[in-house]
Amino acid sequence: FYCAYLPSFWVRLRFLGKHQPVWTRFVALQKLKERYPWLPRIAPAPSLWTKGAVIVWWTFLSISFADIGAYFFGRAFGKRKFSSVQSFSNLGRTSPNKTVEGFMGGTLCSLLLSVLGAWLMAWPLWPISGSIYGVT
């Protein structure tokens, strides 16, 4: 069920219509490319921007940033393992190296990326809506 439903969900998202971002924000980011030519191209062609594509890609990026942030924060600052926390003792058995600090770092990275995405996409109340999107 899940393997068939997820691609159909992507197709339905694609037909939400064209996304109308605040182009001045994307243009400001593109100016960085002119100043620093070694940076990769930040925004794809405008013809590829649909509301569904934006939702899917920001979701993938949020998940990736959460994983990467959790890894690096856990390696750098991790002291308390989940197995030592009474509420999460079962998690400690299945994944013994996970730390509370890694979890908090991953959540923070996902939250910051989602707030940036909400600002770029000109969501209403972007600090709040981006924070909620990043944490959930």
Image (cartoon, rainbow, N blue to C red):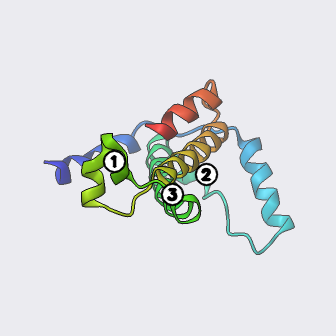
Farthest residue toward the bottom? 38
Farthest residue toward the top? 125
Element at label 1: helix
The spot of residue 45 in percent (x, y) is 61, 57
Disc ID at residue 79: 3
The spot of residue 110 in percent (x, y) is 53, 47
The answer to which of 90 and 115 lies nearer the viewer is 90
The spot of residue 21 in percent (x, y) is 64, 39
For discs 2 and 3, the disc positioned in front in the rendered view? 3
129 over 86 or under it: above or below: above
- Which residue is label 2 attached to? 46
Q: Residues within 10 Å of mark 3 (few under 14, many from 20)?
A: few
The answer to which of 122 and 69 lies nearer the viewer is 69
Query: Which residue is depicted at the point 52% across and 59% down?
Result: 78
The quadrant in which the C terminus is found is top left
The reply to whether discs 2 and 3 touch (Cβ–Cβ < 8 Å) is: no
Badge 2 or badge 3: first in the primary sequence: 2
Is residue 134 visible in the rendered image? The answer is yes
Badge 1 or badge 2: first in the primary sequence: 1
Question: Real-space Cα distance between discs 2 and 3?
Answer: 45 Å
Question: Real-space Cα distance between discs 1 and 3?
Answer: 40 Å
The reply to whether discs 1 and 2 touch (Cβ–Cβ < 8 Å) is: no
Query: Which residue is depicted at the point 24% across and 50% down?
Result: 90
Horizontal side, residue 91 vs residue 3: left or right: right
The reply to whether discs 1 and 3 touch (Cβ–Cβ < 8 Å) is: no
Is residue 7 visible in the rendered image? The answer is no
Q: Amino acid at mark 1?
A: Trp
Q: How many marks?
A: 3
Q: Amino acid at mark 2?
A: Pro
- Which residue is label 1 attached to? 10
Query: Which residue is depicted at the point 38% across and 41% down?
Result: 13
